[in-house]
């Protein structure tokens, strides 16, 4: 358990709640020591309500709980960052976040797709197109990536924007399948690109 400094704000610490999947900041609340301990004990975010003067578990009335994934304190041990999985809208006004934002990130679907392809690779269910790709072998998978790349180039040069996106999606999907067959994930490409973005990166 983190030793928090509850003295700076008369027994309270602010707790920033962030979606573990989308990385969106969902809300800000306050915890006293009891709320913090109950959060850790139950795995559901619990605040101290300053208006009701009692502990308040988010979702206790609506069912929209915040399931705790991780808890971190800042450098002064007086502010919490809680990564959570929300069970529905977070704000009492019915919005996804307390800032009225949509809690979604399309780019994060790539991780979901990667997890799905990993599952296919592990289970290899019959009548699955992804399974058939894995069974075809690395050469065939690599060839398929090449074919999709050519089709993407053709659409970029002489096709429509709609078809470009369509073929580009096909290319990305087949590339992830190929990566998975070699024991890698889409995050490995992201890591490589991130390293290249660094000022200290040098081409191999």
Image (tube, helix red, strand yellow):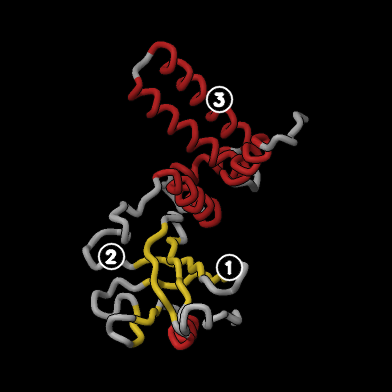
Label 3, label 2: how far apart the Cα atoms are? 47 Å
Q: Which residue is mark 3?
A: 146
Mark 2 Cα shell of 10 Å, populated few (<14), some (14-19), many (≥20): some
Label 2, label 1: how far apart the Cα atoms are? 24 Å
- Tag 1 near tag 3, CB within 8 Å: no
Can you tell which mark lies on residue 91? Answer: 2
Question: Could you say whether the residue bearing mark 1 is in a helix, strand or loop?
Answer: loop
- Tag 3 near tag 2, CB within 8 Å: no
The tag earlier along the polypeptide, 3 or 2, is 2
Q: Which residue is mark 1?
A: 74
Going 50% across and 55% down the picture, which residue do you hit?
A: 119
The answer to which image quadrant residue 160 occupies is top left
Q: In the displayed structure, would residue 22 be above or below residue 71?
A: above
Going 43% across and 33% down the picture, which residue do you hit?
A: 169
Whether residue 41 is visible to the viewer of this picture, yes or no, is no
Taking depth in this image into account, of 119 and 40 the one nearest to the observer is: 40
The tag earlier along the polypeptide, 1 or 3, is 1
Question: Could you say whether the residue bearing mark 2 is in a helix, strand or loop?
Answer: loop
Mark 1 Cα shell of 10 Å, populated few (<14), some (14-19), many (≥20): few
């Amino acid at each position: 358990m983190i030793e928090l400094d509850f003295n700076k704000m008369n027994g309270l610490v602010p707790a920033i709640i962030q979606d573990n999947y989308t990385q969106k900041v969902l809300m800000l609340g306050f915890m006293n020591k009891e709320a913090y301990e109950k959060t850790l004990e139950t795995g559901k975010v619990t605040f101290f309500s300053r208006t009701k003067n009692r502990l308040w578990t988010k979702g206790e009335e609506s069912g929209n709980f915040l399931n705790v994934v991780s808890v971190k304190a800042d450098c002064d041990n007086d502010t919490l960052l809680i990564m959570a999985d929300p069970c529905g809208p977070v704000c009492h006004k019915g919005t996804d976040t307390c800032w009225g934002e949509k809690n979604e990130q399309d780019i994060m679907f790539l991780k979901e797709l990667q997890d799905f392809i990993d599952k296919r690779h592990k289970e290899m269910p019959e009548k699955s197109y992804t399974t058939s790709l894995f069974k075809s072998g690395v050469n065939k998978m690599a060839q398929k990536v090449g074919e999709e790349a050519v089709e993407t180039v053709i659409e970029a040069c002489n096709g429509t924007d709609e078809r470009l996106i369509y073929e580009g999606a096909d290319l990305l999907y087949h590339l992830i399948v190929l990566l998975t067959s070699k024991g890698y994930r889409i995050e490995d490409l992201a890591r490589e690109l991130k390293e290249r973005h660094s000022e200290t990166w040098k081409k191999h």
